[in-house]
């Protein structure tokens, strides 16, 4: 009864069916029979039954050799199929799993392990552990390290049909500990170099693998090694590409940050920040040449800089290099070149040596910062020049107003004959003086306005005002000039136009400038229109004339300071080319816009807008 129960139990404990597509159905059944027969060896049996059992096992092992042609064809078909499937992916982990599953399928192994050599240490590292059910194994140490290391040393395959009785391995701890029996291990080679090993085993049965299995596994390993190396190369290439893309994104962001401002201090701050971020340093400095050719720290704590203020000799090489080292403290410096000349350097301090990648980053940062720093310096110089110009204009304007006031006053006294009678020629001379004084006063006023606007010193004094009334007052002040040239003036002010919150003096100045130009550049007897209407949240005002118009080539430069057309009709009129520039700046200062349309020979229309509620000061 005991024997019957044991026999029944053993028959139910068949090896998990090997579903290898390269083996016929009878071979799978034979595998299961062999497993059960091997299990019966461990049961206490009568001698006669044990003798018959040994004979049955031997005959079962010989059966595959009775069909060598079919077996070989099946092996080659399976080898072709699994080899072909290796090219379906370039993902390293997926390729390794495919290789291991294919090895188990081809060999009929219970388990398979794939180990790759570390090129630096020469040690084997387990990458894949699978079973015949295509499952990843959690226990990754149940292999014979003796066999895998022997294959690495010799570079030749190893086959043992029963490691328990094989004198080469029977005494090895791993063989006894894990009860290992049938084992095959072959090297993986790529371009003649050993890159790893493939190890398969069958722990329950002895004699599972044959020399034919070993040859087949060895042949497949050659193809598998190529697939693995291709996948590795792709992974390295993809990783390098991703790293390069990341570097380009970082450099693009650096360029964006550096070009976002022309403020010198801000550029220095951005450069130091990126230097620390890209090198993992704990302190950074930017050192630049001053106008005397001496180096000075322009950003970073001077008291913490570990070297004297001297720039190392970079010999026109842009690459960063270590310029100081003491203990674990290291100072990396990258030169800043501009126009082929050394203009300064970026230095970063760290508690360990800098990597090649960090050195390259600092070099690239210095190359990008060079232009930004020079642009910021030029901007500062321009700003300083503008400040000096505005200061000069302010002083000159003040100094010129005093003598001009005196000249105007005494001229008026002479014209009024307060000090005695004058003849017509003398009156003509005095009129010329007065006209030129007025012209000079207008120039000084325009220059003063431009200076105050550009320096931010011109302050608006807004209040609620009625535009229709302001237009009427402005046109009345210009009536003598209109009558002098015989012009007709038409005003079209919307009756429902609301009040606006603006500086009446500056609005009147804008209207005066536009109307004065319309009067000057419209031939005698022409027409001028002033229109105003509400347009969304703005007041829209336009001044139209029937004058000479503006040439297309002059229209692009019309609002530039001191620009005057070369047209003879324009040159005949007095002007400095400042009125429209002042007008544009005043309109924009009040929160509006200005523009025009013109056609030579048909006149011009200038328009501007002002917000109803004014611009916040």
Image (cartoon, rainbow, N blue to C red):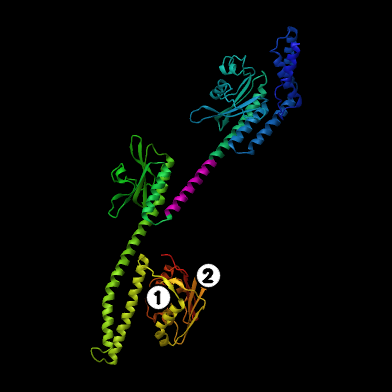
State the residue lying farthest toward the top: 47
How far across and down, in percent of the image, does residue 27 sit? 74, 24
Question: In the visual, does 286 lie left or right of 242?
Answer: left
Q: Residue furthest left?
A: 419
Q: Residue at x 74, y 11 (%)?
A: 2
Can you tell which mark lies on residue 73?
A: none
**Would you say residue 186 is visible in this rendering?**
yes
- How far, Cα to Cα, is label 1 from label 2? 24 Å
Magenta segment includes 244: yes
> Which residue range is magenta in the image?
237-258
Whole-percent x, y for residue 70 in the image: 75, 26
In this view, the residue in front, 79 or 384, is 384
Magenta span dominant secondary structure: helix
Q: Secondary structure at mark 2?
A: loop
Q: Earlier in the sequence, mark 1 or mark 2?
A: 1
The label nearer to you, 1 versus 2, is 2
Residue topped by disc 2? 536
Residue pointed to by mark 1: 509
Do the CB atoms of the residues marked 1 and 2 lie less than 8 Å apart?
no
> Is residue 297 left or right of 590 when viewed as pictured?
left
- Foreground: 465 or 375? 465
Secondary structure under badge 1? helix
Q: Which residue is rendered at x = 49% and y = 72% of the image? A: 539
Q: Residue 250 lies in magenta, yes or no? A: yes
- Residue shown at 59% from the left, 38% from the top: 91
User: Can you say which quadrant of the picture contains the N terminus?
Assistant: top right
Callout 2 environment at 10 Å: few (<14), some (14 to 19), or many (20+)?
A: few
């Amino acid at each position: 009864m005991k024997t019957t129960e044991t026999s029944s139990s053993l028959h139910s404990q068949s090896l998990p069916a090997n579903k290898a597509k390269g083996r016929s159905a009878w071979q799978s059944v034979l595998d299961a029979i062999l497993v059960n027969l091997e299990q019966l060896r461990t049961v206490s049996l009568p001698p006669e039954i044990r003798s018959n059992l040994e004979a049955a096992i031997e005959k079962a092992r010989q059966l595959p050799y009775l069909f060598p042609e079919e077996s070989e064809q099946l092996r080659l078909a399976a080898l072709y199929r699994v080899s072909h499937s290796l090219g379906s992916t370039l993902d390293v982990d997926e390729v390794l799993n495919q290789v291991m599953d294919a090895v188990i399928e081809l060999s009929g192994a219970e388990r398979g392990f794939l180990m790759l050599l570390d090129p630096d240490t020469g040690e084997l590292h387990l990458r894949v552990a699978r079973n015949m059910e295509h499952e990843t194994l959690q226990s990754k140490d149940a292999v014979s390290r003796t066999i895998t290391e022997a294959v690495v040393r010799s570079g030749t395959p190893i086959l043992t049909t029963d490691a328990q009785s094989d004198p080469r391995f029977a005494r090895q701890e791993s063989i006894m500990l894990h009860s290992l029996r049938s084992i095959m291990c072959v090297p993986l080679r790529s371009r003649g170099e050993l890159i790893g090993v493939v190890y398969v085993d069958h722990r329950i049965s002895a004699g599972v693998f044959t020399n034919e299995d070993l040859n087949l596994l060895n042949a497949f390993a050659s193809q598998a090694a190529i697939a693995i190396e291709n996948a590795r190369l792709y992974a390295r290439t993809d990783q390098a590409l991703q790293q390069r893309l990341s570097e380009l994104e970082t450099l693009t962001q650096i360029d964006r940050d550096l070009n976002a401002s022309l403020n010198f201090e801000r550029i220095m701050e951005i450069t130091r920040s990126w230097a620390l971020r890209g090198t993992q340093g704990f302190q950074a400095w930017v050192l630049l040449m001053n106008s005397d050719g001496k180096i000075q720290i322009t950003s970073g704590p001077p008291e913490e800089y570990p070297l004297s203020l001297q720039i190392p000799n970079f010999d026109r090489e842009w690459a960063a290099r270590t310029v100081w080292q003491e203990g674990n403290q290291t100072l990396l410096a990258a030169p800043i070149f501009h126009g082929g000349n050394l203009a300064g350097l970026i230095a970063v301090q760290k508690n360990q040596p800098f990597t090649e990648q960090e050195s390259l980053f600092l070099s690239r940062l210095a190359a990008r910062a060079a232009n930004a720093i020079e642009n910021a310096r030029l901007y500062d110089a321009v700003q300083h020049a503008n400040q000096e110009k505005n200061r000069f204009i302010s002083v000159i304007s003040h100094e010129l107003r005093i003598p001009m006031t005196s000249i105007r006053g005494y001229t008026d006294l002479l014209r009024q004959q307060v000090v005695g009678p004058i003849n017509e020629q003398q009156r003509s001379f005095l009129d010329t003086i007065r006209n030129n004084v007025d012209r000079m006063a207008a120039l000084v006023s325009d220059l003063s306005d431009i200076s105050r606007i550009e320096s931010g010193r011109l302050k608006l004094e807004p209040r609620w005002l009625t535009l229709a009334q302001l237009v009427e007052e402005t046109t009345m002040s210009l009536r003598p000039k209109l009558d002098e040239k015989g012009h007709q003036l038409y005003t079209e002010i919307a009756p429902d136009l609301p009040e606006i919150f603006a500086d009446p003096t500056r609005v009147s100045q804008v209207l005066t400038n536009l109307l004065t130009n319309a009067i000057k550049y419209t031939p005698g007897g022409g027409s001028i229109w002033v229109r105003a209407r509400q347009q969304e949240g703005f007041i829209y005002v336009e001044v139209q004339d029937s004058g000479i118009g503006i040439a297309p080539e002059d229209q692009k430069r019309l609002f530039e300071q001191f620009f005057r057309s070369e047209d003879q009709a324009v040159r005949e009129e007095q002007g400095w080319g400042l009125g429209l520039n002042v007008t544009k700046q005043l309109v924009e200062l009040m929160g509006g816009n200005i523009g025009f349309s013109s056609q030579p020979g048909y006149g011009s229309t200038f328009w501007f807008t002002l917000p109803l509620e004014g611009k916040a000061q």
